[in-house]
Image (cartoon, coloured by chain):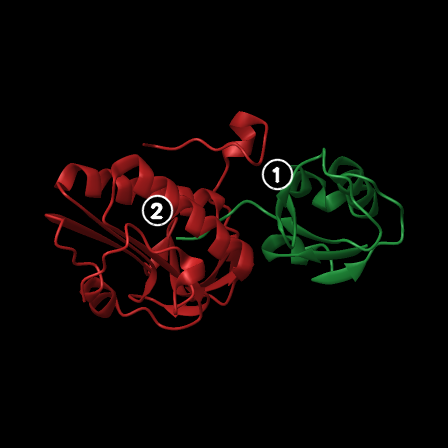
Amino acid sequence: MIRSSSYRPAAEDNFPSVSAAALDIADLLKEAHHPGAGAVVLFSGEVRDNNRGREVAWLEYEAHAPLASKTIAAILKAATEKWQLKIAIARHRTGKVAVGETAVVVITASAHRSEAYAANRYIIDRIKHEAPIWKCEYFTDGAHEWGNNCHCQTVTGDPAKHIYEV
Amino acid sequence: MRIHVYAALKQHFEPEFELKEPVHNTDELKACLQEKNAEAAELLNSCRFAVEEGFIDNAFKLKDNDTVIIIPPSSGG
């Protein structure tokens, strides 16, 4: 399907950007073709079977869905303006996600590849730091632990100020 | 004031509860909760705050009938 919109605000999407529905990356990719885009980059964040030396059984994601969707929509809008993207899509799972399954997808389409790569990295980094979404790791030994990925506050002194790699 | 907490904060507080104490901004809310539960003090220092309309900072004037969402550091992805 060809989309003529310059980006896809989550709020206007038939599919919420944060939901418990399984993510079909092949289906999402079909929506990411645009006549003005010579490059499409897809990032799939998938559940790994280990973390810090412990064997992971599955992850459970919790979110404040309305705020997370609003945050993701703002990030997509910022990326679209910064890199003149033709398409920007982001989806995040909630609930139980098994090893090997996709937890988050970001797709960017732009005229040339450098913009699509850069924008894709920017979007996933900001989602990980800013969107109110949390993972709980369930380990094969029966233990579980909330993830605490964003430590920016220890450096910036402000939970709302983040440090990005790009 | 209605309080909603998420993720690791649920290890220290009920997911939703009513706060009777009068608090007027996020600093006062944070201090009140830290007094109630010292073990959550460090985590609360790294949290963001929001109301249904969006994120707020300490300049936002909280009212008794507000619902405040307390947001620990994100760990999505």
Callout 2 amino acid: Ile
Q: Can you name the residue that lies furthest to the front here?
A: A4
Circles 1 and 2 on the same chain: no
Whether residue A161 appears in this view of the structure is yes
Viewer-nearest residue: A71 or B18: A71
Q: Which mark is residue B46?
A: 1
Image vertical order of residue A34 relative to residue A159, above or below:
below
Viewer-nearest residue: B12 or A128: A128
Q: Give percent across and percent down for residue B64.
A: 85, 51
Q: Give percent across and percent down for residue B19.
A: 84, 54
Element under label 2? Answer: helix
Q: Chain of mark 1?
A: B
Q: Colour of chain B?
A: green
Element under label 1? Answer: loop
Q: Which mark is residue A43?
A: none
Q: For residue A46, what is the image quadrant?
A: bottom left
Q: Colour of chain A?
A: red
Mark 1: few/some/many CA within 10 Å (<14, 14-19, 20+): some
Q: Can you name the residue that lies furthest to the bottom here?
A: A21
